[in-house]
Amino acid sequence: MGDTTTFYRTHTCGELRMEQAGQEVTLAGWMENLREVSQSLAFLVLRDFYGTTQVVLETEDTIQTVKELNKETVIQVTGAVRERDSKNPKLPTGDIEVVPAKIQVLGRCRHNELPFPITRSREADESARLKYRYLDLRNPEVKSNIVLRCQVVSALRAAMTDHGFLEITTPILTASSPEGARDYLVPSRKHPGKFYALPQAPQQFKQLLMASGFDKYFQIAPCFRDEDARGDRSPGEFYQLDMEMAFASQEDVFAVLEDVLPPIFAKYGKYNTASAAPFTRIPYLEAMEKYGSDKPDLRIDLTVTDATQLLSGCGFGPFENQTVKAVVVSDFEGTRKQIDKLCADVEVQSGNKAYWFRYDEKGEIVGGIAKFVQPIKEQAAEALKLTPGCFVGLTAGAKPAAQKTAGVLLKMLGAFCPNHMDKERYEFCWIVDFPMYEIGEESGELEFCHNPFSMPAGGLETIEKAIKGEIDPLSITADQYDLVCNGVELSSGAVRNHDPEIMIKAFWMVGLKEEDVRNKFPAMYNAFTYGAPPHAGIAPGVDRMVMLLSGEDSIREVIPFPMNKNAQDLMMGAPGTVEQKQLDELSIAITHSEE
């Protein structure tokens, strides 16, 4: 805990033990609660960052003085430590109490009513919690997540430094570039009509560092993206463990993270077991086929089976001429009501229906769409490897939709069936061999599937074959990889395309000319023309890591001052209006505003 002796206190509220009995001490903290037993006996709970201590008030005057103070007033207590008659084994300080000789107010709480009880703030409405975040953070449960975040970040820094990486900070004010999400723009006062952008990631800067001759770079990097919130993504800003290595391959990146992350997850996580190196590697297409997701939760032992040949012609309308996927669950004990709810939840999350039947103890097909499967009972039992007591969940549609819906169904079944999910562990895996290109849903044209700066597998030769029409561009894979833990994508990374010739031809495939590439990425393109080393990197999300380690479902629980779902800071009132003078200085006119 370190030396906490100051002008205001000799000990913290979590420090006193029986060894200090008989000593005079000074404590300082927030007045959490006052419980009156009689006119001449009351118990005060004093709380600071480190814990709580009971202060016993034994005179009417002292009790009256404290009664006049509102809860959460900051006070200083000087008095003697003594053994408690009624000990509290649940508290580290539960063997002692302090009898005050002097109580002094250091910071008065001027509100009779608090927005919510401090120790029960997590039960309050989220808007109230965010507006009064400084009160929410006084709750030891809430504060513990922020402490955990600090410990994890410190451990990450130490581990990366031990691996020879240099921590280098990159600019916050930079140029706008097309990296997949919307930029936050910052108007320039000195250059009217022009804008800086906050970086979506330090992607180009870290690659420029490699071109500059630095060998291993990292930082706990702030990233800014104007995108919608969800459970594992905060709007506005987030932080990532950004890293890049020169003269490095995919294997070098994997080796670093497989060495850095498991000990940190095992030490600081809610579960003390984490995957050992090497992590499981799953090609993207295999992941979609086997798990219905490129973010599989390997704690679940269920997989997806293709049932198209078996069921597309069974006479059930939604299966006709569609891809059909099945998730088979042995020893299933759900009720009809639970199954209906599960199917409804799948539809809400995926936008597509789920269907089902059971293979009962007598070897009969029952429930759900049983009448369509019953005529082919033997074929179904053989194809799906059914045993008595099995439940079969089904999805259908175009192949991508059937796969993704099956992935949602699989995860929900895993969570529902404890015998099919070893929950209390951290299971990492790498998703590899991502497609380099895809056909855009809106454009109908060839587009980059993920990171345009990734090196195509096979390099220049592969791209030239696609240009000549010798291979299908959609068959090209990228030297790109995702790190997934317990069904949560922690990061994307890649071996970078460091060769200007390959870069120009890779972008040509999606309709961009050399001039376009030079204009969009001038610094990086020009730097690479001066000779750049092969390099690779990755950037696991710090917020998501801490969310997994703490066992929280919402990322906002591990961020000190998060925004709400609408990207608003209710505490600071951001975004907010500014004075006309400020707009004039920036040559900005507002043409539309919210009503």
Image: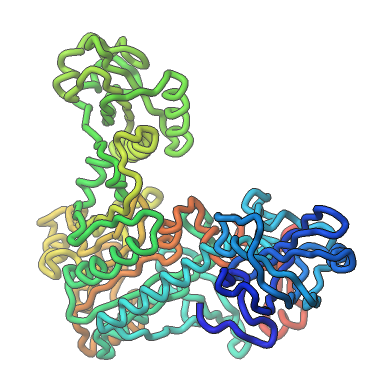
Asked where in the image residue 119 lies, by quadrant, the reply is: bottom right
Name the colouring of the figure: rainbow
**Residue 187 place in picture, x, y as percent:** 60, 80
Residue, x 51% and y 81% (percent of image)?
A: 2
In this picture, residue 185 sits left or right of residue 314: right
Question: Viewer-proximal residue, 394 or 513?
Answer: 394
Query: In the displayed structure, would residue 368 be above or below residue 254?
Result: above
The residue sitting at 27% across, 68% down in the picture is: 507
Say which residue appears at 65% left-offset and 75% top-offset.
Answer: 22
Tally the numbered discs.
0
* Image position of 179 (left or right of 384): right
* Camera-nearest residue between 387 and 100: 100
Q: Which quadrant would residue 584 be assigned to in this image?
A: bottom right
The residue nearer to you, when weighing 386 against 437, is: 386
Percent from the top left, x then y, of residue 162?
27, 81
Q: Is residue 116 left or right of residue 220?
A: right
Viewed as shown, does residue 174 lie left or right of 55? left
Q: Position of residue 297 (x, y in %)?
A: 31, 47
Look at the image and tell me whether residue 511 can be seen: no
